[in-house]
Image (cartoon, rainbow, N blue to C red):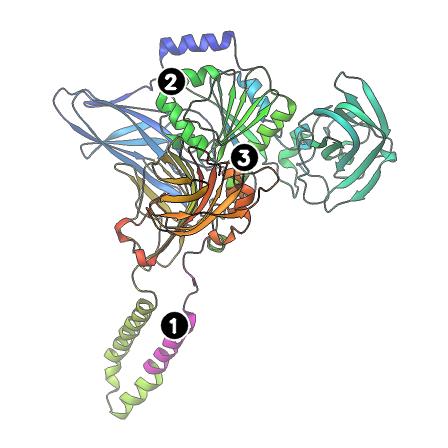
Amino acid sequence: MFATGRRAVLAAVWLALAGSVPAASDFGDVSVGAAAMYQGSTFHGYAETRVTLENHSHSRLHTVTLVYPNHAYGYGNSLSRLSRTVKLAPEARETVSLLQPPLPAMGDNTIRVEVDGDNSGEVRAPNANNHCNAYSRSGVMATVFISRSLDFDAIEKVFQANQGGFTAGKAVGPPDVHTRGLSTEAWMPDARRGGRTNWLELDYTPQTVDHVSLYFVKVPATPGDMLLIDATGTNKIQLPFSSGTGSWSSATWILEFTLPTPMSAVKTVQLNFGTEPPYNVGVDAVQISGPAGKQWAADARASSDNSASAGSFTSSGSSGDTVTSLRAEAPVAEWSENWLAYTPFDAVALSATDLESMPAAVRTALGDYLAAGGNVVLFGTTSLPAAWHAAKTKQRFDGAEYEIGFGSCYAFPVGTPDVSSVQVVRNAVRQNAFYWEGLPFDSKSANAAFPVVDNLKIPTRGIVVIMLLFIIVIGPVNMVYLNRIKRRTWMLWTIPAISVGTTLLVFAYSLLREGIKPDSRIGGITMLDQVSHHAATVGATAFYCPLTPSAGLRFEPGTEVTPLVHLGYDSSGSPREIDWSQSQHLRRGWVSARVPAYFHLRKSETRRERLQIVNDNGRLSAVNGLGVPIKSLWYADANLHVYSASGIAAGQQAGLITSAAPVEGDHSGASGLLRELTFAADPAKLADIPARCLLPNTYIAVLEGNPFEENGLGAAARPTRTRSSAVVFGLLETPHTP
């Protein structure tokens, strides 16, 4: 499953002999070469291009500026300039990252090289114009990054269940057809093969079955039948479609079968449609039920599919729910040491050997990606790095699932994962892509989710009153007055004077109404692991500036900043510039005067803030070491008894009181808290959420301020005009039980 045999050995030998250092171009004393970890399209996160610079001079220092794209001709919300300036000491060699935020950068596929201020030439940009350009937010495209040490075809098969419309994989998982009629989100046989026998087989984890539900996009033909097969391949029972009970839901025809006798160890459901015309067949999902619970299919295969016609098929459904697999262009020893380089991926697949052999910095970067909400799928027997500290572990007979920060690591020691585990991994990858799909990419919905000011309406009434006064004064009043004093020629200067005065009045009105100071808002959820001293933050920031900030916005180099704007090939929006020379400097185009700007943020970093629980002879108290006041606090001990406190100043200690008895159910942890509150993390929506999300020896704190996210306005921000809050899910070092 996870070894490629001779192909992997030959590839490793070739890499050892040839190396993977990009071919360099010389510009006087300086040589420049660019490379990327992969080739292909990505749809969110930061796309990395790594540029290797070398100064061959023995005595001269050179200043090198890289600009991508060399010539930009994009329009709409796009990236017109991505730059970085590096000072190269004599005989120095340095590899730097050019990180493209989630905006298209349409250009001439080259990086301009400026040496000591002079335009010296260009180098080819690998994987140019492939980031966010094909992104349609009406469909989902998940991306999996696969290590070179794995069998690419086998791993791709694990994730590609729903590749293309009308495939058998479209019947995997729960129903996803939303309107009646044929849809690319359902399986359909090949329409070019009329008159042939059509069938669909779906696999499950073996269980006892007493009920089966079939979800069709059309009422099935009565000659068809359903066959249940056990784990040994033995046919258990065959039922004609006519024996089921059917009814329409909003979008699908549900055919229900209650078995006369429960059938044990059912593994496969086979649907036979005979020679029914393909356009009369469409299966959205199949569910089996029994004493052990309910299951949707985890894998599927069919006599044929109509995927060849999916591209030209017009349907209310989308054929975009696909997974694209990208093969690593370099061995793990040469993977990026920056966690942002992995943010375009909804999952990273690697082997145990990869994890053990990769440099510590690469392992740390992958851990940061994982904690910030990524997925890592690990094939082979190994131990997780200590820094990948799991808050929650779920054992499977074929492996384990670890919840680390907001992300998940799936480890499969031997062989191909079981069908149920495959479905879990597939769902995790798709849900990650759906998360980005679901963000509010327009100002109206972004403001509804995360308002930056209370009133964004244009002061229409006041401006209309001023304009009416202007019309009256510049017209009748002016003319009557000048006629009365017999100075009608003065209109040559009174009309311009009144116009200038009105303009100044409108400016003064706007100034008095809004001022010149910007408003900003910061909020988010932070998973603070006090065991590994690591914090992962998912949140948002927003700005409303009466005047365009001349210095732009600045964020730390490790912050992922996603502008919540529409991406498309129309003329709306504006090009933007970013510079990475000293920080992540969003220079021009990101914030406009009197137009609110919204950004989704993620961070993954080492932090030393902490909350300490003190047990004094059974009396619990909390010491606030989070750096800002705690507004509300909930703490769960090792037995999931919940305690609470409020109003704890920074550095102070307060007693805890019993809040709630243990709550039954699967406590969802930090990822569950994020699902409940979303990235906007409004503390007012917490209510009874803490009791459902807390794990043993964890806490949830609402802070008056946010020490984990920076204000992009920097010194231009005003504390009195900044709304800042944070919700912290904390994992404590040592359990405390009264």
Q: Secondary structure at mark 1?
A: helix
Q: In 3D space, how far apart are the residues under numbered discs 1 and 3 (Cα atoms)?
A: 46 Å
Tag 2 residue: 333
Q: Position of residue 183 (x, y in %)?
A: 68, 39
Which SS class for mark 2? helix
Gap between marks 1 and 2 measured at Cα:
63 Å
Amino acid type, callout 3: Met
Contact between marks 2 and 3 (CB within 8 A): the answer is no
- Depth check, front residue: 69 or 616: 616
Q: Residue furthest left?
A: 59
Please report the residue visible at 50 percent of the width from the left and 9 percent of the height from the top.
7
Q: Does the residue at mark 1 contact the one at mark 2 (Cβ under 8 Å)?
A: no
Q: Nearer the viewer, residue 733 or 661?
A: 661
Q: Residues within 10 Å of mark 1 (few under 14, many from 20)?
A: some
Q: Quadrant of the N terminus?
A: top right
Front-lying residue, 125 or 403: 403
Q: Amino acid at mark 1?
A: Ile
Confirm whether the magenta stretch covers residue 469. yes
Q: CA distance from mark 2 to mark 3?
A: 28 Å
In the image, the segment drawn in magenta is 450-474
Q: Residues within 10 Å of mark 3 (few under 14, many from 20)?
A: many
Q: Report the residue marked by disc 1.
A: 463
Where residue 239 sits, quadrant-wise, is: top right
- Name the secondary structure under disc 3: strand
Please give the name of the residue rendered at 77% of the width and 41% of the height, measured from the top-left corner. 253
> Which residue is label 3 attached to?
141
Viewer can see residue 196: no
Kindly give the residue lying farthest to the front in the view shown. Answer: 617
For badge 2, the amino acid type reads Ala
Q: Is residue 437 above or below residue 490?
A: above
Q: Earlier in the sequence, mark 2 or mark 3?
A: 3
Most common SS among magenta residues: helix
